[in-house]
Amino acid sequence: MPTQDVLIYTRTAGYRHDSIPAAAAALAELAAAAGFGAEATEDPGAFTPDRLARCAAVVLLSTTGTVLTDAGRAAFETYVRGGGGLLAVHAAANAEPDWPFYGALLGTRFDGHPEIQPGTVCVDDPAHPAAAHLPARWEWTDEWYNFTANPRATGVHVLARADETRYRGGTLGADHPLVWCREAAQDRGRVLFTALGHASEAYADPAFRAHLAGALHWVTGR
């Protein structure tokens, strides 16, 4: 599969994060630093077999609601099953709510969040490129997403968790995954989700940018 660029998709059909422009610019910069081109788009027509065949990875960037057509879904599923990479960021856990394939790919769904507040991210896999630069306990401020179920039960590899004792409003208890990845079984596609990234200023933060850079490194198969 040609690995030429990163497609950054920012379409929303529900809540729209003010951070999307800053996030898209940051991800384009990180893609360029990794040697890839980047295209940011809100056009569902970008999800065609020919366009996706040129992608090193697709980034679903705080997408919400139904943002793909039926044809786009089919092309995207074929892309992932054929070995393509997906980086799903923040509100992407609230995208495509009625598409079972996408729900199974992520392993869970968004289920609300408390107010933005400081908290602690606990790193589970310091060897993974998306977490290797982080301290074992990383102090961070964000929307601390809750999920309908713990994705660990679906076989994902958890990279980092929230310490629910350090903020208000968590619903998953002692094991609250925030960042996880999976290889899409025999299909070889790589998927990484990070629940972090609500605020525009996050995308200028060196630690968070390194987190995203490592995630891109992994999903593109570097």
Image: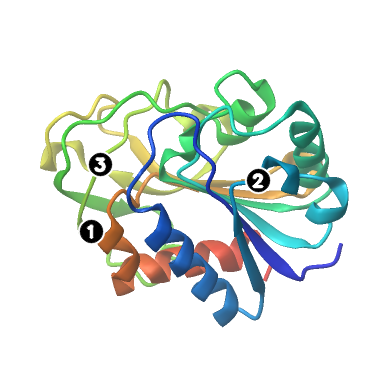
Q: Secondary structure at mark 2?
A: loop
Taking 194 as reference, is 134 above or below it? below
Residue 124 percent location from the top left of the image: 38, 53
Instruction: Specify which label sits upstream in the sequence, 1 or 3.
Output: 1
Kind of residue sitting beneath label 2? Asp
**Which label's residue is closer to the chain start, 3 or 2?**
2
Coordinates of residue 144 in the picture (x, y in percent)? 26, 39
Tell me if residue 190 comes above or below residue 149 in the rendering.
Answer: below
Q: Residue 182 location, x and y as percent?
A: 61, 45
Residue on which disc 3 sits: 143
The residues bearing labels 1 and 3 have C-alpha atoms spaced at a distance of: 17 Å
- In this orientation, does residue 14 appear? yes
* Local secondary structure at mark 1: strand
Under mark 1, the amino acid is Arg
Residue 97 relative to residue 186: left or right: left
The residue at the point 27 percent across, 53 percent down is 199
Q: Nearer the viewer, residue 112 or 140?
A: 112
Quadrant location of the C terminus in the rendered image: bottom right
| In the image, residue 84 above or below residue 134 | above
Q: Which mark is residue 137?
A: 1
* Of the two numbered discs 1 and 3 in the rendering, the one whose residue sits closer to the viewer: 3
**Is disc 3 placed on a helix, strand or loop?**
loop
Q: Which residue is mark 2?
A: 43
Give the mark toward the camera: 2 or 1. 2
**Label 2 vs 1, first from the N-terminus:** 2
